[in-house]
Image: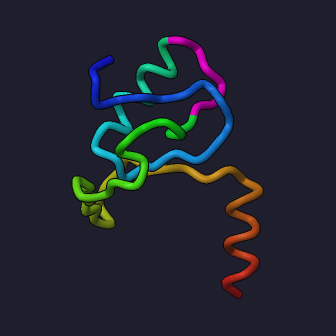
Amino acid sequence: MNNNQNPVHTKGDRNIFCPYYRNCLDYAVELRWKYWACLDCRHKKKGDFLTDVLLSPTDTGPYYSLSPSVYKKATHNSV
């Protein structure tokens, strides 16, 4: 882990737009943390380096997945 990352082993909010999010996630996985947060990180409100991935209808791999309960709520509310 480098000096730009500072994940904390506690429940709390994470900044998925942080340029170091993936590194912190990898670090938490290595240590087998069930949860982690960006509480003490100086980048916790940073979002400048987000890169959006454009997908086309012909893409075969899912960009993300939803749990069945979330999917049911989302489709139920959109009707």
Q: Residue at x 33, y 66 (%)?
A: 57
Residue 76 in percent (x, y) is at 75, 77
Q: In the picture provided, is 3 more to the left or to the right than 31? A: left
Residue at image point 68% right, 71% down: 74
Residue at x 58%, y 14% (from the top left corner): 32
Counting from the top left corner in percent of width and height, residue 38 is at 50, 39
The quarter of the rendered structure image containing the C terminus is: bottom right
The residue positioned farthest toward the top in the image shown: 31
Depth order, front residue of 10/30: 10
Q: Is 35 colored magenta in this rendering?
A: yes
Q: What secondary structure do most residues of the magenta stretch adopt?
A: loop
Q: Looking at the image, what colour scheme do you see?
A: rainbow
Q: Nearer the viewer, residue 1 or 29?
A: 1
**Residue 48, percent from left and from top:** 24, 58
- In the image, taking residue 42 as reference, residue 3 lies left or right, namely left
The residue most toward the bottom is 79
Asked whether residue 11 is drawn in magenta, I would say no
Magenta stretch bounds = 31-36
Q: Position of residue 7 (x, y in %)?
A: 48, 29
